[in-house]
Amino acid sequence: MFQFIFKRLLYGTLVIFGVIIAVFFIFHILPGNPINMLAGREIDVKTREQMTKDFGLDKPLAEQLALYLNDFSPLSIHENTPQSYKNYSFLLTVPVGKNILVLKKPYLRRSYHTTKPVSDILVENIWGTIWLALASMSFATVFGIILGVVAALNQNKWLDHFVVSISVIGISAPSFVAAIMVSIIFGYYLKDYTGLNLQGSLWVLDENGRHLVLRNIILPAFTLGLRPLAIIVQLTRGSMLEVLTQDYIRTAKAKGLNKFQIIAKHALKNAMNPVITAVSGWLATLMGGAFFIEYIFNWKGLGYVTINAVEKLDFPIVMGSTLVVAVFFVLISIAVDIFYAMADPRIRLKG
């Protein structure tokens, strides 16, 4: 089991390393200059050179990548001077020859525009994305299972065809298109009936202070949950149809159990394995998929902050938020793998 977990952690580390390299080079080949975005094009040459040096943009690209990896790594090596690791929240330092080895929290640097630590910015905004992902996944799971069961019990009837057709549309529609349509229809044209806002965050600050506005999560959670809802509907329907043909279902019918007892106690429980797999995999995916939806609904989360950072070429925030999503995805994937390995030893042997 230890070897299985070690391999998954190693694969996860390689994934995060790949994400760093990919995002780093994609960002640096984009047109535009963060110095121009920050200070304008009319600054003098001396100021421009000083700002470029302060941000580390005067170094070759390969060296910039190496320095970023050194900052992000929990173990990093530096010159043996306090100045070389002053920005770190370190736990331990060990001299190694003329250098020093530092055990620290990963350092995500500071925003180009606000000079605020990126870790602080992410902590302030991550809960908006987490609550949005959890709300959308809860909506998708509950209604997906209900609609899937209804479709299976009405196989080849109009209700079955209707549910399947709607689920196909849900899978096919791009999230940003669905977000625009949902926000305009329910948050603008039907606002008098729904009472929902076109845009808004979970926490709202006004003259009366900061307060919770739960209705603001309804439209973005509904939009974000449409695609997993559609997939869960089809998984539940297919699994239920297969389970309903099993011998133990026929035995339960022969014993005189009513339809509700057969579905609730026997069929549904055995049909949930593929649904559980889908739900566990989708939770991390939704955190990444929330980016454009957060921006359209003006929902303060990682996605909203990241898209604003891309527009301003604020590289540290872009890299930091991308890494947070990647780490969540890796950790959830590892947890799911471990769960299945504990439940089925054959998976351990294959891994």
Image (cartoon, rainbow, N blue to C red):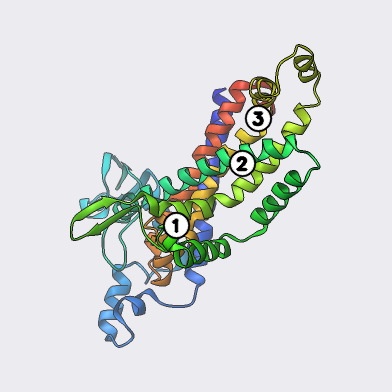
Residue extending farthest to the top is: 255
Res 311 → quadrant: bottom left
Q: Amino acid at mark 3?
A: Asn
- Are the residues at dot 1 and dot 3 in contact (C-beta closer than 8 Å)? no
Residue picked out by circle 2: 144
- As drawn, which residue projects farthest toward the front? 193
Question: In the displayed structure, would residue 54 be above or below residue 155?
Answer: below
Residue occupied by mark 3: 273
Q: Number of marks in the image?
A: 3
Within 10 Å of disc 3 (Cα), the crowding (few <14, some 14-19, many 20+) is few
Q: Secondary structure at mark 3?
A: helix
Disc 1 and disc 3: Cα gap in Å?
36 Å
Q: Which residue is mark 1?
A: 194
Q: Amino acid at mark 2?
A: Gly
Residue 112 spot, x, y in % from top left:
31, 67
- CA distance for labels 2 and 3: 14 Å
Residue 83 badge: none
**Number of residues whose C-alpha sits closer than 10 Å to that of mark 1, classed few (under 14), some (14–19) or many (20 or more):** few
Q: Secondary structure at mark 1?
A: helix
Residue at 67% across, 39% down:
148
Q: Nearer the viewer, residue 245 or 331?
A: 245
**Residue 127 against residue 256 in the figure, above or below:** below
Residue 279: image quadrant is: top right
Q: What residue is at 43 percent from the left and 68 percent from the top?
A: 310
- Quick check: 137 left or right of 36? right
In primary-sequence order, the first of circles 1 and 3 is 1
